Amino acid sequence: MNKKQKKMLIRIIIAAVLMIALNFVPVTGWLRFILYLVPYLVIGYDILIKAGKGIKNRQVFDESFLMAVATIGAIALAIYEQSGDYTEAIAVMLFYQVGEWFQSYAVGKSRRNISELMDIRPDYANIEKDGKLEKVDPDEVEIGSAIIVQPGEKVPIDGVVISGSSTLNTSALTGESLPRDVKEGDEIISGCINMSGVLKIRTTKEFGESTVSQILDLVENASSRKSRSEDFISKFARVYTPAVCYAALALAVLPPLVRMFVMGTDAAWGNWIYRALTFLVISCPCALVISIPLSFFAGIGGASNAGVLVKGSNYLETLSKTKCVVFDKTGTLTQGVFEVNGIHHNAMEDAKLLEYAALAESASSHPISRSLQRAYGKEIDRSRVSDIEEISGNGVTAKVDGVEVAAGNEKLMKRLGIKFIPCHHVGTIIHMAVNGAYAGHILISDIVKPHSKEAVSALKASGVRKTVMLTGDAKKVADQVAGDLGIDEVYSELLPAGKVEKVEEIIRNKREGDVVAFVGDGINDAPVLSRADIGIAMGAMGSDAAIEAADVVLMDDDPMKIVKAIRISRKCLRIVYENIVFAIGIKLICLLLGAVGIANMWLAIFADVGVMIIAVLNAIRALFVKKL
Amino acid sequence: MKKTYKIDVDCANCANKMEEAAKKTAGVKDATVNFMTLKMNVEFEEGQEPKAVMQEVRKNCKKVEDDCEIFL
């Protein structure tokens, strides 16, 4: 609670106690009026002052002004009818203030909660000076400086590890608690927490350009891009208050006149004016206006905590309507890293064959040879290899430990006149010959991410009608991957420009109101990301181009995060619609009941404040997305 | 040119009113008020002096909502 809220709370308590106590004081006439005026002024003096200023500035539909009119009107009626019932006016003012107080408290609290969730801003960077560590403002660290990160500290600026090795906790960025190991030479991004060893890092970016600053900027500005729901509500609020006020005026004047002149009965002015004043109590649109941006703010906050960065409330809204998801294959559904996936028809042990292959290919930096070396897993001793001969488009021949080894495709085997066994698997096949005899083949392929299949079926389960895969790869490979994962449509052998065309075609053919999302890794598919209704970049930690082009950024490259993003957006939008329908519904019912005289001022103010409290609590629910 | 200002306001509807008032101020091309982060983004028209324009924006906002502040 801040100072303002504490002061308000004290006023609320004093006024409430006085109001109840006065019920037991048997006074009448002017003394009663003056006594009751005390709690009224205690609780409402600021509203009255604001109302006065509103009149000066010609703000007739200012809520303070309306509250003042309603309560003063109620007091005037009590005097006129000599009922002495001043409690009602005090109660209206009291509950109105309770509502305002609650709103201010809840909003402040969720502001703090959400900024705590995003508490990744580093406060300082350590710089070594004369053998001592000195804490400096990260903003002052220049590119290329060496900084020290001790265990337990946040990495303040993006950079490369110069010395030391450690384990990093990336959960603040990705929402996943899987630790990541780093050693000398590794790139490291800001916002991670160093868990074990001391790291010396050479910075490669300024603080303002570092991952952590970019993320914070993005999340903070996200709620400024307003959604259609928010626009609708602010427009509604602009019309609602004047409409209710004019209705109140009509209610106060027309029925009595009709009664007097048409029906010839008693005008019952007091009765109708009371009903009109009830209208004014319900005229404040606050519940609506607060709960919608609060829902989006909480949704975006919760999402970023789960490693899903949504760049605007409008994108969260669009994302929730996703009916078709278009995937890029490499790097999105598959790892984009070639791996040894099988060794077939070999005469010797797998490990031995792999050793020969890795050594023979050791001079090459081709992705295929690197994957062989990775699969081998041990340090390559170049001195064991001699007479390396690369035959372009075929493979290599070399002597490993004096043994003749040939590693390459079918052409190489044919060229060497060695009989080979073709492979029926999809991927790149390395045939091996050792000492001139066929020794089996190694299957290398891009492997599917562990959660890809699960993600595709989860998308289907959460209401996505169609899944499409686009790839530049060969048809055979693409069809197999799509078949394995349960993707509906595949378009293969596409050039980057072809991907844009395909997405445009899908958008042209979609149903009205459907949303087509494109998921890519942000590397060379930026045009597609920006062309789709909603572009989702995954695994984008540290990739500026992807963050720039996408509407939604997934911090790691787990395809389940796509599902999570859509679920978060659906939950948030469901809450938004609940609040709109609920708040408008209750208000309309109250207006109706007020007009026919069933609802009195007590009920009106209870409904008004109650709706707001419920709507605000409901909005905060958007923050809880861990279990989605 | 775009600039961001910190603001202080208590209710969401008042924030909307401030946004309206800011948009209507001469020299302002577009304005958004973010109630949740208490920030006002203002886009100025070409050749306008932000400082002078913001004084007007502040005055207009005070008119629609007395209890608000823009930290210039």
Image (cartoon, rainbow, N blue to C red):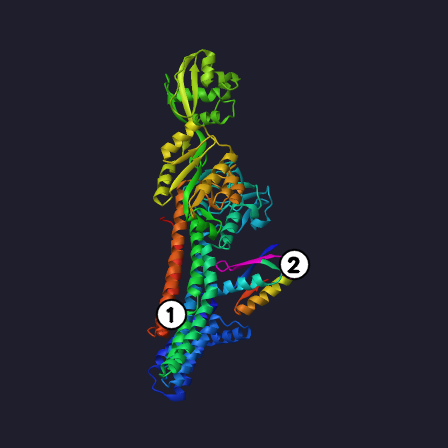
Question: In the image, what residue occupies the spot 38% across and 88% down?
Answer: A29
Of residues A457 and A390, the one nearer the viewer is A457
- Which quadrant holds residue A179? top left
Indicate the position of residue A555 as horizontal and vertical percent values.
Answer: 46, 43
Indicate the position of residue B48 as horizontal and vertical percent values.
Answer: 65, 58
Q: Is residue B46 magenta?
A: yes
Amino acid carrying label 1: it is Leu
Identify the residue position indicated by label 1 in the image.
Answer: A591
Can residue A336 be seen from the camera position used here?
Answer: yes
Of residues A472 and A169, the one nearer the viewer is A472
Q: Is residue A208 left or right of residue A166?
A: right
Q: Which residues are magenta?
A: B30-51
Indicate the position of residue A196 as horizontal and vertical percent values.
Answer: 45, 42
Indicate the chain on which mark 2 is placed: B
Farthest residue in the right direction? B47
Q: Kindly identify which numbered label has been placed on residue A461.
A: none
Indicate the chain on which mark 1 is placed: A
- Which quadrant holds residue A598? bottom left
- For mark 2, give the secondary structure: loop
Identify the residue position indicated by label 2 in the image.
Answer: B48
Q: Count residues near mark 2 (Cα–Cα under 10 Å), then give few for <14, some for 14-19, many for 20+.
A: few
Of residues A367 and A161, the one nearer the viewer is A367
Amino acid carrying label 2: it is Gln
Q: In the image, is residue A234 above or below residue A433?
A: below
Q: In the image, is residue A409 above or below residue A204?
A: above
Q: CA distance from mark 1 to mark 2?
A: 47 Å
Of residues A599 and A445, the one nearer the viewer is A599
**Badge count:** 2
